[in-house]
Amino acid sequence: MNRLNISVISLFFAVTVFTGCQKENLECKEFCLYSNVENFDKTAPFINEYLSTLSKKWSNERTVRALVDWLNSQSCIDVVDFEIIPNWCLTPPVQNTASVNIKLLLDDIGVEKEIILNVAKEVESNSFIATGYQYTKPKAVAVTTSYDIKVSTEQIFEFINLFGHKVTLIEMYTGSYTSDMPSSSLQDILDNLNAKPYVRVHGFLDGRIIIIPWLHDMENKDYQADWLQTISDYNLYEWSRYDIEHGFAIYFDVPEGTEKEWIAKFKKYEIVKTSSRVLQFKAM
């Protein structure tokens, strides 16, 4: 066998080990069937199978770089960037482990979409596995109100009524509602609020009654009127224990493809502190 033939065969085996595409259970075409935001979790067996072929003696960085190269070998993926989060940055710190975020661009039925793949090193097996991914949720835009100024519940409803969008959720990201009713009223308040179709609440006593609500589908003006009557009935008012005002987070559904446009529009309003896309996590 001449030197040229040896070189060609050596290159063939190197590519086979590197890409994994020649292995029966790691076909590149099958991997790319799931290269979309909704189904990317189904790529976990392919990713984990490739990771299992790598030496456990390798450093974290060498293993991650090999994975990045393997991902880039798939025709439907481009790796934009990656970050290795060392064990001392984890909460709580875990010895001999690490977490990795890999930013990917997917060819999602002809549309380029970005996700962040999360890979973690298991302590017991000393091996990396894919644990989940984050992606930008279509249509969803989150708006937070400024905690430099006082914003009432009435103002929140007036604000969302300007646009006619579906409001999937309103929550308080700083502060809560409180009430000057007797502490013995807490359970009665919780039971009555949780019976409503649009609200879920958590409450506790901390020298006063504390109520933390999650309000759903609040573009519904009947729900708005009912909530305003409810906070009046139970003497609820917005409150923060810190030297800042309470803040609301509002989650809108806007027409798909107009998210950036609406982010810019929302930012023009005085009560708005931030306006951004919404990241969603899916386990693998």
Image (cartoon, helix red, strand yellow):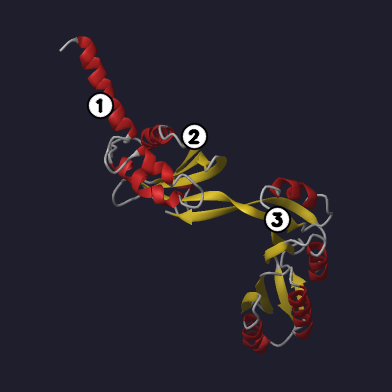
Residue appearing at x 32%, y 35% in the figure: 21
Secondary structure under tag 3 reads loop
Relative image position of residue 93 (x, y in whole percent): 43, 51
Q: Amino acid at mark 1?
A: Phe
Indicate which disc, 3 or 1, sits on the residue closer to the N terminus.
1
Q: Amino acid at mark 3?
A: Val
Residue that protrudes farthest toward the front in the picture? 109
Res. 36 mark: none
Q: Find disc 3 in the rendering and name its residue.
A: 254
Query: How many other residues sit within 10 Å of disc 2, few (<14), some (14-19) or many (≥20)?
Result: some
- Which image quadrant is residue 283 in? bottom left
Q: Find disc 1 in the rendering and name its residue.
A: 13
Secondary structure under tag 2 reads strand
Relative image position of residue 252 (x, y in whole percent): 70, 59
Q: Nearer the viewer, residue 279 or 19?
A: 19
Relative image position of residue 276 (x, y in whole percent): 69, 50
Relative image position of residue 172 (x, y in whole percent): 69, 66
Marks 1 and 2 sit apart, C-alpha to C-alpha, by: 23 Å
Indicate which disc, 1 or 2, sits on the residue closer to the N terminus.
1
Query: Does the CB distance between marks 1 and 2 fall below 8 Å?
Result: no
Secondary structure under tag 1 reads helix
**In this rendering, would 119 be left or right of 58?**
right
Res. 78 mark: 2
Residue that protrudes farthest toward the left in the picture? 1
- Which image quadrant is residue 224 in? bottom right
